[in-house]
Amino acid sequence: MRYRRANVAGGMYFFTVNLAQRDRTLLTDYADVLRATLRGVKWRYPFHIEAMAILPDHLHAVWTLPAGDADYPLRWSLIKAGFLRHMAKTEQRRPSRLNKGERGNWQRRYWEHMFRDEQDYRTHVDYIHYNPVKHGYATRAADWPYSSIHRYIAAGTMTRDWGAGEPGQDGQFGER
């Protein structure tokens, strides 16, 4: 059975990508490696990162692909493989992964979502930036170093105290 994904050239997508072992902290332990890998893939296969937060065991991102290009699966494959080239082979691997020559660090699948409208986009960007607070890694979104919120603060579209205290008017920070 072939997994069906959204496939719109030049589209904007939300992603959630997880480690297979959710108790590991590889993504923040090796955040510089992940960033360098992202830069390398972006250089070869351009895309724009609208928003992103890296947590210890998963990450969320919003990407815009170039016009005429819908191949985000290739990009994620290269990012995952490129990141793992810098990791020792200490992960547990099931026979199915061994048979396919796969490493066991990443979950095979990831979540992708195409935006319905501007509000849907804004909700997901807020969700990304609030996620470190939700998981207890920071008391306010700006305190988390592995987040694009710092770019939004520098641009003046968010404040340093966003994501602290009471949730937004919908009762949440970008969550449904």
Image (cartoon, grey):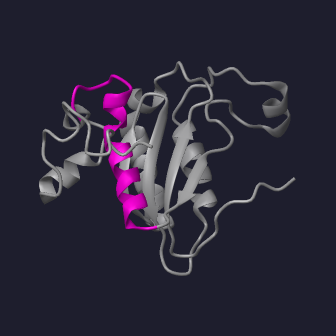
Q: Residue at x 53, y 18 (%)?
A: 23
Chain part drawn in magenta? 117-140
Q: Is residue 20 shown above or below 33?
A: above
- Horizontal side of residue 115 vs 90, given as left or right: left
User: Closest to the observer: 4 or 91?
Assistant: 4
Q: Residue 176 location, x and y as percent?
A: 45, 43
User: Closest to the observer: 54 or 166?
Assistant: 166
Q: Residue at x 55, y 56 (%)?
A: 113
Q: Residue 146 location, x and y as percent?
A: 31, 38
Confirm whether the magenta stretch covers residue 132. yes
Q: Residue 143 location, x and y as percent?
A: 20, 32
Per the picture, the main secondary structure of the magenta-coloured stretch is helix
Count of numbered circles on the image = 0
Query: In which quadrant of the rendered view does residue 89 lie?
Result: top right
Residue 165 appears in the rendering: yes
- Horizontal side of residue 168 vs 100, given as left or right: left
Q: Residue 24 location, x and y as percent?
A: 51, 21
Q: Is residue 11 shown above or below 131?
A: below
Q: Residue at x 33, y 39 (%)?
A: 172
User: Closest to the observer: 82 or 113?
Assistant: 113
Q: Residue at x 43, y 42 (%)?
A: 34
